[in-house]
Amino acid sequence: MDLKDILGFLRKPKPKLAELRDRAAALPSEIDTAERAADALERRRRDMLLTATDAELSTIDADIAAANRGIERLFAVKDALAEKLAAAEAEDAETQRKRKYEAALAAHAEGLTALRDYVPAAQTIIDVIRRIAAAERIIAAANSDLPTGSAKIESPEQTARGIPGTSTIELSRKPQAWAWHYAGTNEQWGFVDEGLLATCPVQEENGRHYIETRVHSNYTQLNKYLVEKRRRIEIRTQLGLSPHLPIPLAGSVTLPGFAPGADDLWRPVGSIGGLYGELGSGADTVLAQVEALAEASRRRPKDPRGELVVNVTHEIEARNSGAVE
């Protein structure tokens, strides 16, 4: 350790935190090295006691004293570094807290700015709902009395937010192996069981094919069943999807009032999903609510905490015993 360098560093009024940490981290190794050197001098002195002169012993005594003094100084430096490091870390932590606090104050101001945009933004959404309802009313009137050959006009919300239906599509056809199948009046029986064919082979008669089976307990009566070759065809299809009907914005959007106790700026009309029998048919109800909530928003909000209450209590005050009335 360069004592002059470390003392100069400790005299700095505000040493850098990173350098303080580096020097504090390196100090234990320096102390360990100095202690091992002092121990080596002590062992050497013991080995010299019977052979060295007084002058030589005085020299090594001075070396041991200097080594121990250096160790003491290292521990003093360690304490001083620890004190300065603790102060610097506390100051750094406070600086970080101040930065976060200043950032939080800026965020608070930004939040207030954003909140000032809430009512205008809500009014924009309400105006969108109003314009949709006004359009739906005009469309409903036209759809109720269409010109000859004209297609019905769908709801703008269905056009913009819905998903059209899809048709079922045949993907592939894969023929299976030919097999014997009941025909004629017994066609509904389907394919002939393979086990039955093993005992009742198919017979041909006049260009037609039959199988014969014996019936009744004595198995004397024969029944003939008409059969013919048929095969299954495996058909893979992709099933169509029905159209997706969106829940109208007027029936799903909620915009609470801004001030405490204020009426909602917008609340869903009717029950979610059941607002209209047909998308767009509730336009009159929506427009009526637009007017009603606009009127309500002009009323002064009521304090949600309720009315002020005056509470009267009594205290008993003691009079000093020496007081004269």
Image (tube, rainbow, N blue to C red):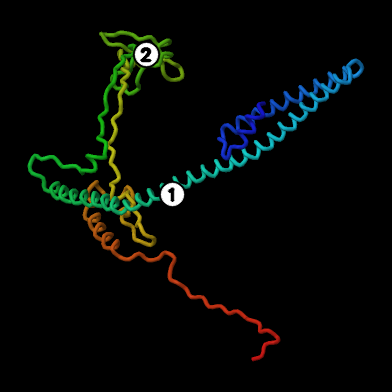
Circle 1: element type: helix
Circle 2: element type: strand
Q: Estimate how packed mark 1 is, as few (under 14), some (14 to 19) or many (20 or more) residues with alpha carbons within 10 Å.
A: few
Q: Estimate how packed mark 2 is, as few (under 14), some (14 to 19) or many (20 or more) residues with alpha carbons within 10 Å.
A: some
Residue 194: x %, y % from top left: 41, 13
At a point 29% along the width and 33% down the height, the residue shown is 241
Mark 2–mark 1 Cα distance, whole angstroms, equals 98 Å
* Residue 191, quarter of the rendered image: top left
Residue 93: x %, y % from top left: 55, 42
CB-based contact (under 8 Å), mark 2 and mark 1: no
Residue 136: x %, y % from top left: 19, 48
**Which residue is label 2 attached to?**
212
Residue 64 or residue 200, whichever sits in front: 64
Residue 152 or residue 157, whichever sits in front: 157
Residue 316: x %, y % from top left: 62, 81
- Give residue 105's mark: 1
For the question of whether residue 126 can be seen, the reply is: yes
Mark 1: amino acid: Leu
| Above or below, comparing residue 150 to residue 254 in the picture | above
| Above or below, comparing residue 212 to residue 166 in the picture | above
